[in-house]
Amino acid sequence: MTAVTATAPPTGARTGRTARRIRSVLFSAIAVVITIVSVFPVYWMIQTSFKPNNEIITSQVTFWPKSFTLRNYQTVFDASRSEFVPALGNSIMVTLLTVTIALVFAFMASLAVTRFRFKTRKAFILTILIVQMIPGEAMIVSVYRVLDGWSLLNTIAGLTIVYVATVLPFTIWTLRGFVNGVPIDLEEAGMIDGLSRMGAFWKITFPLLAPGLVATGVFGFIQAWNEFLVSLVVNSRPEMMTLPVWLRTFQIANGTTNWAAIMAGSTLMAIPVVIFFVIVQGRMTSGLVAGAVKG
């Protein structure tokens, strides 16, 4: 009976597996460090919102509230001292209008520059790039004077127009990449199967573009929700403030700042963004799956 001898793997193969294992451990450690660095400011904001001010303004660092309190959130919702609810309503209205209008116009513009060939096509794309290079602060005086001439200062409509103009160039450029990635042959194949041009677009092309619309919508939502300078200049009345401007109201007369209330307000301000992202993330996944299946 012949004995079977186990053959040891070559030295090179063992060395390769060891190197891959080391790289995997190293990359995992780097990912953990990056995650901690990213999450820690959010954790610090939330746990600080439950501390009293005397526990915040101290040289002793604590990573958990010693005296847990909800007084900071009561300060935020106190209508006599804070305009949180009106500011929240203004931010929601302006942000939703900005995202909706920007996506509609950007979608049509991206289809035009991708699916059609016209003389000013390259000039239009170049203009989009140039507009993105101009900082918004450089145009704030002009924007103020234009809105003042149109009697749109301290209005939702005026702030929405400015936000749409700010978000639109990047949105068009981003959607253009998504539209360009969907071959027009898919629409032509649908028309061969009996669909009209519009039917082929809505049943075949549009589901494939849904993730792009969601991605650009997320960008527009975050930019409009967190914008501060334009809202500070254009909507200066207390009843027309958005949430980023409203946070400035916790500046006390003697020059100090109510950091506890600011952290509580910032935590509440972040909740709608998180909710929006969770909802959109699910729709993005379903859009990818639906777009990959022929309807």
Image (cartoon, rainbow, N blue to C red):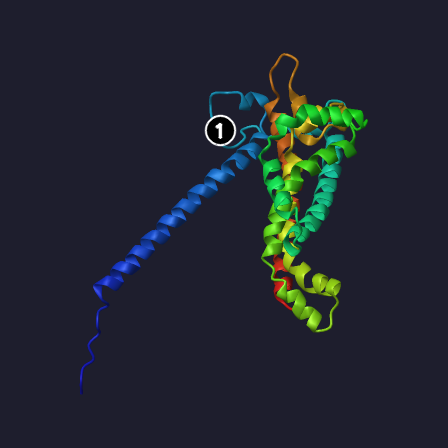
| Quadrant in which residue 4 is drawn | bottom left
- Quick one: quadrant of the N terminus? bottom left
Number of callouts in the render?
1
- Residue 85 % position (x, y): 75, 32
Residue at 75% across / 38% down in the picture? 93
- Residue 285 % position (x, y): 61, 57
| Quadrant in which residue 46 is drawn | top right
In the image, residue 110 above or below residue 142: below
Q: Nearer the viewer, residue 294 or 142?
A: 142
| Amino acid, disc 1 | Thr
Furthest toward the top, the residue is 254
Q: Which residue is mark 1?
A: 62
- Residue 48 % position (x, y): 56, 30
- Residue 47 % position (x, y): 56, 33
- Quick one: quadrant of the C terminus? bottom right
Furthest toward the right, the residue is 151
Q: Nearer the viewer, residue 76 or 197?
A: 197
Q: Is residue 219 visible?
A: no
Q: Nearer the viewer, residue 82 or 203?
A: 203
Furthest toward the bottom, the residue is 1
Residue at 35% across / 48% down in the picture? 26
What is the secondary structure assignment of the residue under circle 1?
loop
Q: Residues within 10 Å of mark 1 (few under 14, many from 20)?
A: few
Q: Is residue 2 visible?
A: yes
Furthest toward the left, the residue is 2
Q: Nearer the viewer, residue 51 or 95?
A: 95
